Amino acid sequence: EIVMTQSPATLSVSPGERATLSCRASQSVSSNLAWYQQKPGQAPRLLIYGASTRATGIPARFSGSGSGTEFTLTISSLQSEDFAVYYCQQYNNWPPRFTFGPGTKVDIK
Amino acid sequence: QLQLQESGPGLVKPSETLSLTCTVSGGSISSSSYYWGWIRQPPGKGLEWIGSIYYSGSTYYNPSLKSRVTISVDTSKNQFSLKLSSVTAADTAVYYCGVVVAAIGAFDIWGQGTMVTVSS
C-alpha cells in the first residue's frame, strides 16, 4: 500500500508571500498525483492533477511539480482566499486505490 | 456540467448499516468517461477514499474497509450508492461522493457532503 506524507503540517504565511508545500509517496506514483484545496465546511476542490496540470478555473498562481515520490505545490503569492488545508492524493495503482496525504494547513502569519 | 448530491440518514445506530445515495445530474452515470467514488472525512481529520465503481460495474474498495463496503449503481435513476455495514462511532464522518473524469484521473467534481453520525 502506498503511504502519502505531507510537510509541514502547518504553514504560516503572510498575504502576498510564496508558499511551498511538500508531498512524498512511499513508492513511485509516476506523475499520478493530485492536489486539493479544502476550506472549512466545504468539499475539497481539485487544483492540480498529473502532478503539474492545473484543473479548470484554477488561477496561475498555483503550480505543481515533481514526479516519482517527491512533489511540490507552490502558491506564488498568497491571496486571502488561499488560506485553507491542502491535500495531495495519489492515483497510481491498478486496481485503483486513491490515497490521500494528511494535509497541510496554510494559515495567516 | 456534472453535479452530485448525497442523500441519506444523518444518524445511524452502532452495528447497523449506513446507506447513502449519490444522485448525478448533468451527465450519464453509464458514461465511460467517468467513474464514481465515495470519500469520507471524520470530524477534524483528513480524507479517506472508501471505494469506486466503474461504468462497467467493476468495484474497487479501500482494503481497510473492504469487508464492510458495497458500492452499486442504479442506471435507471442515474444514482450510485454506498452501504457500510456494522458501523461504529469510528465511522462518524462527512461522506462525499465524487466523480473521476477518466482523462484526468483524480476526483474532479465532488458533492457537498453529508454528515453521518453513528450513535445510539
Image: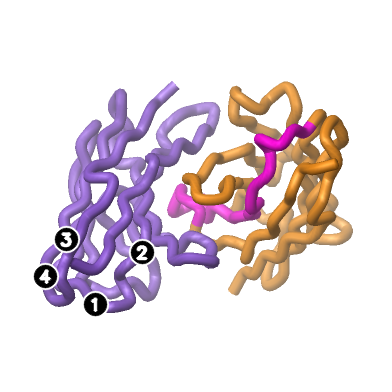
Chain colours: A purple, B orange
Q: CA distance from mark 3 to mark 4?
A: 7 Å
Q: Secondary structure at mark 2?
A: loop
The mark that comes first in sequence, 2 or 4, is: 4
Q: Residues within 10 Å of mark 1 (few under 14, many from 20)?
A: some
Q: CA distance from mark 2 to mark 4?
A: 15 Å
Horizontal and vertical percent for residue B2? 62, 69
Residue at 33 percent across and 57 percent down: it is A48
Residue at 22 percent across and 45 percent down: it is A8
Residue type at mark 3: give it: Ala
Horizontal and vertical percent for residue A83? 31, 68
Quarter of the figure with residue B109 = bottom right
The answer to whether marks 1 and 3 sit on the same chain is: yes
Q: CA distance from mark 4 to mark 1?
A: 9 Å
The mark that comes first in sequence, 3 or 2, is: 3
Quickly name the residue at label 3: A19
Quickly name the residue at label 4: A17
Asked if the stretch drawn in magenta spans residue B8, the answer is no
Q: Which residues are magenta?
A: B87-107
Residue closest to the eye, B47 or B80: B47
Q: State left or right for residue A107 relative to residue A41.
A: left
Residue closest to the eye, B95 or A50: B95
Q: Chain of mark 1?
A: A
Quickly name the residue at label 2: A84
Q: Chain of mark 3?
A: A
The answer to whether marks 3 and 4 sit on the same chain is: yes
Residue at 60 percent across and 24 percent down: it is B64
Q: Secondary structure at mark 1?
A: loop
